[in-house]
Amino acid sequence: MMPSITRRAAAPALVLVLASAALALGAEVTRESYVAAVEPICQTNAKANEKILAGVQSEVRRGKLGPAAAQFAKAGAALKRTLNELRAVPQPQADKPRLTRWLADIKGEVGLFEATAVDLKAGQKAAAEHNSTRLTSEANLANNEVLPFEFRYCRAEPSKFA
């Protein structure tokens, strides 16, 4: 059995190799092939966030802002890694403008995770809650941008945690 870290690293790498091979063979990237390439990347991030952000709401409610800050910082770092992996996947030519906006929205989400962590660490619960609300709004914008792709895992749902 392969260690979980190796498996997590191997899946996105395999997707990139397959996508690159298709491009090398002259195959056009389709919306369907793009979805097939990015969904495993997003699935890995979604599962990681379930673990990372488990109980974060109760931590904040109980006033344990330090541990909550660490959770938000860790989730932001995980999303940043995911964003870099998503940027490396070849995109369908017709969808490049839409996907560029989507990736920019995800970058905004990364910034809001980081800002929430900073606010929580500083004991600024109200500011953190404001950023958390903005995070949900930014995620909804990102989700709306890629509705035609019918993503399952590449749909952000921060309201489940924040």
Image: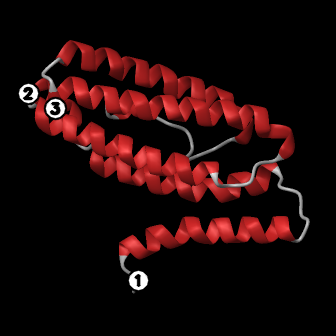
Amino acid type, residue under disc 3 in the picture: Ser
Quarter-of-image position of residue 103? top right
How far across and down, in percent of the image, does residue 141 sit? 58, 23
- Of 89 and 64, which appears nearest the observer? 89
Mark-to-mark CA distance, 1 and 2: 39 Å
**Residue at 67% of width from left, 30% of height from top?**
101
Left or right side of 143 for 52: left
Residue at x 25% of width, y 14% of height: 127
**10 relative to 94, above or below:** below
Is residue 141 found left or right of 58 in the rendered image? right
Q: Nearer the viewer, residue 135 or 83?
A: 83
Q: CA distance from mark 3 to mark 2?
A: 6 Å
Q: Are marks 3 and 1 in contact (CB under 8 Å)?
A: no
Question: Is residue 141 rendered to the left or right of residue 100?
Answer: left
Side (left or right) of 121 relative to 50: left
Residue identifier under label 3: 58
Q: Residue furthest bottom?
A: 1
User: In the image, what residue type sits under mark 2?
Assistant: Arg
Q: Secondary structure at mark 3?
A: helix
Total of numbered circles in the picture? 3
Viewer-proximal residue among 152 and 79: 79
Q: Residue at horizontal 72%, vertical 41%?
A: 149
Q: Secondary structure at mark 1?
A: loop
Residue hosting label 2 = 62
Q: Is residue 17 above or below residue 146?
A: below
Going by the numbered disc 1, the residue's amino acid type is Met
Disc 2, SS? loop
Colour convention of the picture: secondary structure
Q: Quadrant of residue 56?
A: top left
Q: Would you call the spot at circle 1 few (<14 residues within 10 Å), some (14-19), or many (20 or more)? A: few
User: Cβ–Cβ below 8 Å for labels 3 and 2?
Assistant: yes
Dot 1 corresponds to which residue?
2
